[in-house]
Image: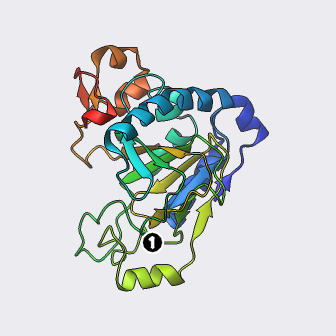
Amino acid sequence: MLLKLTEQEKLTGVPEQETIEVAVEQIRKNGYIGFESVLSKEQVQELKDAFLPIFNEYIDRFGYNTGTNRAQMHLPFLQPFIQDYMVANAFAMPVINAVLGEGVRCTYLASDTACPGSDYQNVHSDVPPLFPNLGVALPAYSLVLNIPLVDVNEDNGPLEVWPGGTHLDPESTKHTAIDGEMLRAAKSMYSEKVYMPAGSIVIRDIRMWHRGTPNRTQENRTNIALIYNNDWYGAGGTIHVPQEAYDQASPQVKSLFRHERVGASLKMPWQW
């Protein structure tokens, strides 16, 4: 489900309370929600201009790592990748905070790029359940935020998701790779591809079934990928946060990355 911003929301740059409530309901019940065209064209272009040379160098050094012509790449903790409009987005954070509660932090600053010729990913969940033998679903404790840097359509590798409860079924989230009986179920269950303009945002429960689809165009399909956790979930400390960049960041960005390696030297993607 992709929500269009109201005229009031476009004017103020923040979501109305009813919008937040609808988004929270959708994440809890269906596993995800999207907001259409949240970032401006100028902000999207700023991210693209900064991202492309880094990505090209990364591919030259290491090639693809998440399937045919597909790459996950960590982002360095520097501008513009630590702008509020990206990591502390005014539409995303009220929803994320409402779902996860106080003390949210960001533990993953990265990207996912489906290049021309990429193929289907296997259907998967990003994490196994915390307590696989509990037999009941836990409330959300980790959310993924994606921001596409190009318009996403049928041809360039849209995200495909399985809404309606795959994030809530303890049996279906026992394995990150959906295979055997679960794969058979995935083939017969309802799924949908998320089409959206560049600069939209999608927030999903990290346990939700999903996959990347083929990019049949001649242009990369890049998603910014961020993960927000409850304060108690995940050790943190993997993102190198240079002191100067941290000092110049907004209070909200500082709070989100407070458990990372503040004061460490900058770490480029090929140094992971």
Residue 120 picture location, percent across and down: 48, 65
- Residue 22 percent location from the top left of the image: 62, 55
**Residue tagged by mark 1?**
166
Question: Which of the 4 quarters of the picture holds residue 131?
Answer: bottom left
Give me the residue at 22% from left, 75% from top.
133
Name of the residue lying farthest toward the right: 7
Q: Secondary structure at mark 1?
A: loop
Residue 125 horizontal side relative to residue 2, left or right: left
Q: Is residue 49 left or right of residue 132?
A: right
Q: Is residue 119 left or right of residue 2?
A: left
Figure quadrant of residue 263: top left
Residue 99, image x and y in percent? 46, 51
Residue 88 visible in the current orientation: no
Count the marks: how many? 1
Between 240 and 156, the residue placed more toward the observer is 156
Residue at 54% in and 64% down: 160
The answer to whether residue 82 is above or below residue 68 is: above
Q: Residue at x 46, y 34 (%)?
A: 87
The kind of residue on which mark 1 rests is Thr
Task: Locate the N terminus by quadrant.
Answer: bottom right
Camera sees residue 29: yes
Q: For the view shown, which residue lies furthest in the front direction?
A: 60
